[in-house]
Image (tube, helix red, strand yellow):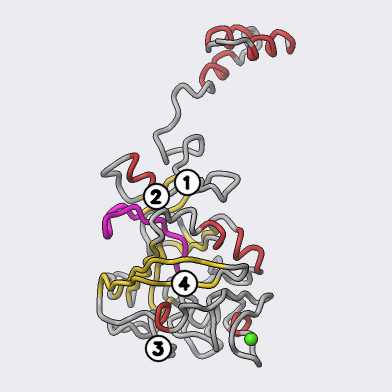
Amino acid sequence: MQVATSAGLSGAGTTAAPLAVAFGGNGSASTAARSDHTHPSPPGDGADNPATSCAALLTARPGIASNFYWLKPSTAAVAFRSYCDMVTDGGGWTLLWSNLRGGRGKPVTEIPWHTAINTLPLYSGTPIPNLESFTVYTGLSHWSALAPGKLLRYSWANDYGSPVDQSYKCTFALTGTNYTLGLSACSQLVGSVVPGLVSSHNGRPFSTYDKDNDSDPSNNCAAWYTNTPFWYFNCWSGSINGGGEGSTSGHQNGAHWSGSTTGWGTDNGLGAGNGWMFVK
Ligand SMILES: [Ca+2]
């Protein structure tokens, strides 16, 4: 049986019909016929036909709705699901990192360097098309491949149920072995407050609790904020992690837009709110 199957598969011009015959008689003929890839999922709808990015997916399927889709950039060995914002600022945005006001169990908490760089999307909460229902973190080694337009957007709301108060996009690059953040050609999409990501963290290398690249010679910033990674200096203004998991630093747990105040989010871009980082 194995010899016959091998011969059938290797023959030039083999079609689904003889393949089904080769597997016939053991009850698996219909299964073989269905797995011959003549009817793949629409791009992005299944692991068998992933898109390389949300931007590429929108090009392939214009007008497609915002949702979770299957992606597989060149940097990933397997396909995974990410949320695609197909509406804001022309659509095609892949959500890579988010944090929510007062949330617990963030996917970035306690992750070491090798995870922070290499992981496929890690989720906490319920990954449904409601950006207030989950948080996500995607390893930095995948960001550039998911951003054919080399664009990064950070959007922020001061509380659940509130519209986005501030949003900013820039051309970005992550360079060198420390994934140093480079932002240029920025523009404000919503609000009027420049994010600390640009004013304070541009040009900073990435740090994790086990790889201290921050500019504070006497402290490990990542360790101070419950082992959360970021492009720390000494230590942050507008970190998406805020005070980390337990707020023991005095800063609340949530995404900060600008500054490092200890309060909850307000509509002037201060305090701990909800934040989302996308690339396109
Ligand atoms: Ca340090």
Bin the neighbour count of mark 4 within 10 Å (Cα to Cα): few under 14, some 14-19, many 20 and up. some
- CA–CA distance in space, label 4 to label 1: 25 Å
Q: Image quadrant of ligand 1? A: bottom right
The residue carrying mark 2 is 54
Query: Is 107 on the left or on the right of 260, as rendered?
Result: right
Confirm or deny contact between disc 4 and disc 1 (CB under 8 A). no
Mark 4–mark 2 Cα distance, whole angstroms, equals 22 Å
Say which amino acid is labelled 4. Gly
Q: Amino acid at mark 2?
A: Cys
Query: Is disc 1 surrounded by few (<14), some (14 to 19) or many (20+) residues within 10 Å?
Result: many
Q: Rounded to the nearest whole Å, what is the CA distance between mark 1 and mark 3?
A: 37 Å
**Magenta extent:** 85-99
Mark seen at residue 263: 3
Can you identify the residue that label 1 sits on? 71
Q: Which badge, 4 or 1, is on the more N-terminal residue?
A: 1
Residue beneath disc 4: 182
| Cα separation between marks 1 and 2 | 8 Å
Closest to the camera, between mark 4 and mark 2, is 4
Q: Disc 1 or disc 3, which is closer to the eye?
A: 1
Q: Label 2 near label 1: C-beta < 8 Å?
A: yes
